[in-house]
Amino acid sequence: MLHKLSKQKQVGVICELIGFALLILAAVLLPFRPASSWKYMLFPVAAVLILLPIPVMWKDGLHLMREQPARDTHWHRMRQSGFFDLLVLFTAISLVLFICWAFGNITYHATLERHAPGAGTVEAARQMPEFVEYNFKQDLNLIAANYSAFGWAALVCAVFVAVCAVYMRFVSPIVRADEHLQIAHAIYRRVAQYAACILLVIISLFPIYWMVISSFKTSDELLRAVPTLWPNKFIWDNYPNVLKKAPFDRYLINTLVTTLIMMAGELTVGVMAAYGFSKGEFKGKNVLFMLVLGALMVPIQVTFVPIYVTIARLNAIDTWLGVVLPNLVSAYFIFMLRQNFMAVDNSYIEAGRIDGMGRFGTIIHVLCPMCKPTLITVSIISFINGWNSYFWPKMVTQSEASRTIAVGVQRLKETYAGQYVSNFNEIMAGAVMAIIPIIFLFLVLQKYIMTGMSKAAMK
């Protein structure tokens, strides 16, 4: 797209992109305190790079805008823009934040006056012998304790709305009049989209990066007050030490077996129940399905005690049966599969019956192939949930013979004498070993996950 512009506008686009990049870099570096003060020079340099190309970029657009007759008012044109609704939303948010700031400010000073009459500020109140700062902070509510943050947030939203409104009123007509400016702004939008995507990817992957890098550090380096983003020296012995300290092979077998059993149970029960709720005809079908949906609203902490008592009476504590039995049915998977089965036309079911298929034959040979992406998605999600399960296996397993890998990583905190140590580098190494199968599974089958989830959402 850049080659469609003239040389002058190409230079202008590049200068403005560099200016915005420097402006963002300066804003990011502002809270930090490097030894040199060069970061303060980034703001004027960025302003010059952004403002300097404007006369060249807008010259043709201003000329064309003056020649073209105005078709409608500026207010009507701004109202027609979809971005205008977003500005209204931010205006409402700014107003709410301002109200919170005002309420918090009044409450803060009223509380301070009650604890230190006539002080006015906390610094002056600290000079009073009867003032107890801890009691003062305890009496503050959430809004009063953070009223300055609400004020800054309201100011940022208001500035954003003002800048966008000025852009829509004065800059947007110039851009609409000049096709080359439209191309330039399309380049800006594309660069901004890529930058936002890269930023989100970095934020999402940084915890995994930190875990992997920390697994190669020494314990002293990992516990430093100022963290290092790269190890001073790679310690490869952390992984062999993990395998020596805990029976990870046994944890891996336990996790794999219990996860596969849970996945098979959830998939089988989910398919059968979804078929009954979507294609079956019986009294109370909708009521029963509402009860299934109601199970989604009940957290495991509420049902933990009765489930634990039931497993104990079955003598299934510290066994594979105790781990998998409460997880053989998933209400969410039943709902997800039911939505997909309902989208299958009943004519396919009737055709299967004409060919002599029973209910199981119809499910296996008609419904399952037509809903293959969703079934694969359900299987993958079930496998990931079973592999990462920690709360219930932690409560029901007591020995190395039945512990899963998520619970086994915690055992790395103990030495051979049973004492706890700060070996977080080895814990990170164990966590890396635990997530490798999940990452590999996601990388191989990610397209099925996306397809299945999108189809379920559309249904």
Image (cartoon, rainbow, N blue to C red):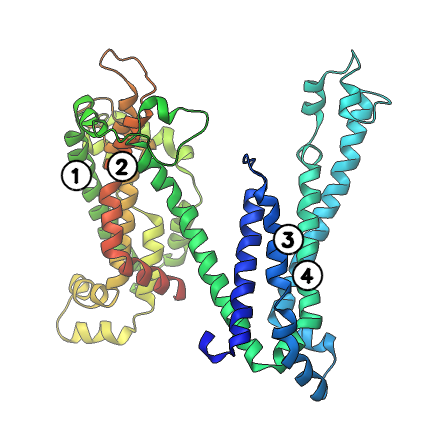
Amino acid carrying mark 3 in the image? Pro
Residue at image mark 4: 163
Q: Which mark is residue 44?
A: 3
Residue at image mark 2: 432
Q: CA distance from mark 1 to mark 3?
A: 62 Å
Which is nearer the N-term, disc 1 or disc 2?
Answer: 1
Question: Which x, y percent locates residue 134?
Answer: 68, 19
Asked if residue 230 lies left or right of residue 354, the reply is right
Question: Which x, y percent locates residue 69?
Answer: 72, 88
Do labels 4 and 2 touch, CB within 8 Å?
Answer: no
Mark 2 secondary-structure assignment:
helix
Q: Nearer the observer, disc 1 or disc 2?
A: 2
Residue at image mark 1: 257
Q: Compared with residue 335, is residue 366 higher up or lower down, i.e. above or below?
A: below
Asked if residue 27 lies left or right of residue 371, the reply is right
**Label 3: how many residues lie within 10 Å, few (<14), some (14-19) or many (20+)?**
few
Amino acid carrying mark 4 in the image? Val
Residue 392 appears in which quarter of the rendering? top left
